[in-house]
Image (cartoon, rainbow, N blue to C red):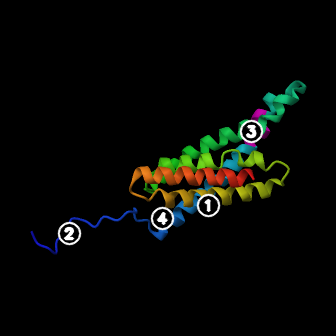
């Protein structure tokens, strides 16, 4: 065989172009805004009418939590669809890690003005999607999983502090 012929140079990381990082950031921003907006819509127009009618105050407190869960699951599906279209490496892992790390972020921000919560949600989802898309580039799956779990735990600890 010819020595100048190389089968393919194997790197420990999957390449990711700057353009793809920007696309992931925009997708994360959109998912964050949709999560916040859908949470507000479901809470205001669906669950508040169902759970808060007839003076049921204990159930009414949970309306925001349930609406956020619904919105987060729906928008995570949309984010997964976007990431498959953008050909992000391991899109399901990115979406699952971002969803788990930011689960309940809107509920944690009760008492803050709505537009601040929307901005915060958009920025945090954008940062989380870019971070996890960057971390899962590791070709060794077990190492990527260990790193993802460590980052998710760190993010959850930072958000709960």
Whole-percent x and y of residue 27? 57, 57
For the N terminus, the quadrant is bottom left
Badge 2 is on which residue?
A: 6
First in sequence: mark 3 or mark 1?
Answer: 3
First in sequence: mark 1 or mark 2?
Answer: 2
In the rendered image, residue 113 lying in the magenta stretch gets the answer no
Is 147 left, or right, of 58 in this rendering?
left
Report the Cα–Cα distance between label 4 and label 2.
27 Å
First in sequence: mark 4 or mark 3?
Answer: 4
First in sequence: mark 4 or mark 1?
Answer: 4
Badge 1 is on which residue?
A: 127
Q: Who is closer to the viewer here, 84 or 62?
A: 62
Q: Who is closer to the viewer here, 15 or 70?
A: 15
Whole-percent x and y of residue 11? 35, 65
Assess disc 4: are there few (<14), some (14-19) or many (≥20) residues with their C-alpha within 10 Å of its C-alpha. Answer: some
Report the Cα–Cα distance between label 3 and label 2.
55 Å
Badge 3 is on which residue?
A: 65
Which range is magenta?
41-47
Labels 4 and 2 touching (C-beta < 8 A): no
């Amino acid at each position: 065989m010819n020595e100048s012929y190389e089968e393919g140079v194997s790197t420990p990381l999957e390449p990711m172009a700057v353009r793809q990082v920007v696309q992931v950031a925009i997708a994360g921003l959109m998912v964050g805004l949709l999560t916040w907006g859908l949470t507000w819509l479901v809470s205001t127009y669906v669950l508040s009418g169902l759970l808060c009618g007839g003076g049921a105050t204990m159930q009414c407190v949970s309306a925001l939590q349930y609406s956020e869960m619904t919105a987060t699951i729906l928008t995570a599906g949309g984010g997964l669809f976007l990431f498959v279209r953008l050909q992000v490496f391991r899109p399901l892992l990115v979406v699952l890690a971002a969803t788990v790390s930011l689960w309940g972020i809107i509920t944690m921000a009760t008492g803050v003005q709505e537009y601040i919560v929307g901005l915060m949600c958009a920025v945090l989802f954008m940062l989380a999607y870019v971070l996890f898309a960057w971390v899962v580039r590791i070709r060794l799956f077990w190492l990527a999983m260990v790193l993802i779990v460590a980052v998710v735990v760190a993010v959850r600890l930072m958000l709960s502090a």
